[in-house]
Amino acid sequence: MLKVSISEELKEKCPELALGIICCDITNTAHNENLWIEIEREIVILKNSFTLENIKTKPEIAATRNAYKTTGKDPNRYRPSAEALCRRILRNMELYQISTAVDLINLISIASGFSIGGFDADVVEGDVVAAIGMENEPFEAIGRGALNIGGMPVLRDATGAIGTPTSDVVRTSLRLESKRLYMNINAYRGRKSLFSTMDAAISCLKTYLCAENIESTIIG
């Protein structure tokens, strides 16, 4: 199990923050039809429940946006990933199909509103600390290049930043050949909001990624 902690500077800014941590062995695939049936079902639910104008009121999205404002980042310019996913759906744009591991994380994020980091645990170096990004801190974001993470909640391993609620870094990204997953669920309303989502995530991991040796905990 990876050792994950929350820095004092982030605790001070976001005292309710809790991190849902799941680590497990996985068998990743390029596509899973049954998973996409479930994703399409969540898309219908989302479209029946929210509009582009009010998606930011979804509780976990609202909490993440408030956290950004507290740590010093504009959530309209640097949207949390859950909000960005939901906005894409509400614009009637197709979701990217990446791999079963990444698509599964997107499913959980759409359903819950949590911004979720997904990492190759075998590439993560040493312990992980949740903190606040520094100006000019290197961050090569997946699919978007260099990202300014100054003032943004960030996860760091022994080598450097690996993820934010907006995007994860290329270095520790999930690949088709990844064998062990580290999932980090950012909950800015406290640990009680995590329980049902973690149960759903573990169930999906077993169903769609044949997850084994599952370890889970809540930090904060």
Image (cartoon, helix red, strand yellow):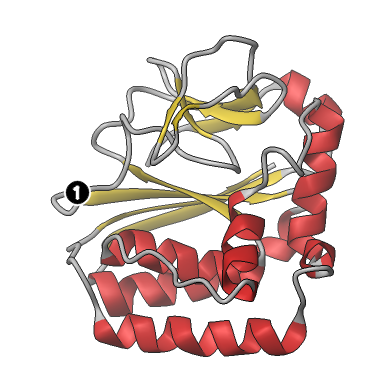
Q: Residue at x 39, y 41 (%)?
A: 143
Whole-percent x, y for residue 31 in the image: 22, 73
Q: Residue 71 falls in which quadrant of the image?
A: top right
Q: Residue at x 43, y 69 (%)?
A: 202
Q: Is residue 113 left or right of residue 75?
A: left
Whole-percent x, y for residue 199 in the image: 53, 73
What amino acid type should be assigned to the residue bearing mark 1?
A: Ser
Q: Where 46 sits versus 68, above or below? A: below
Which sits in the foreground, 105 or 217? 105
Q: Residue 54 falls in which quadrant of the image?
A: bottom right
* Residue denoted by label 1: 178
| The N terminus - image quarter | top left
Which sits in the foreground, 120 or 2? 120
| The C terminus - image quarter | top right
Q: Where 96 sits versus 17, above or below? A: below
Q: Where 169 sits versus 118, above or below? A: above
> Is residue 198 at least partly visible in the picture?
no
Question: Can you name the residue that lies furthest to the left here?
Answer: 177
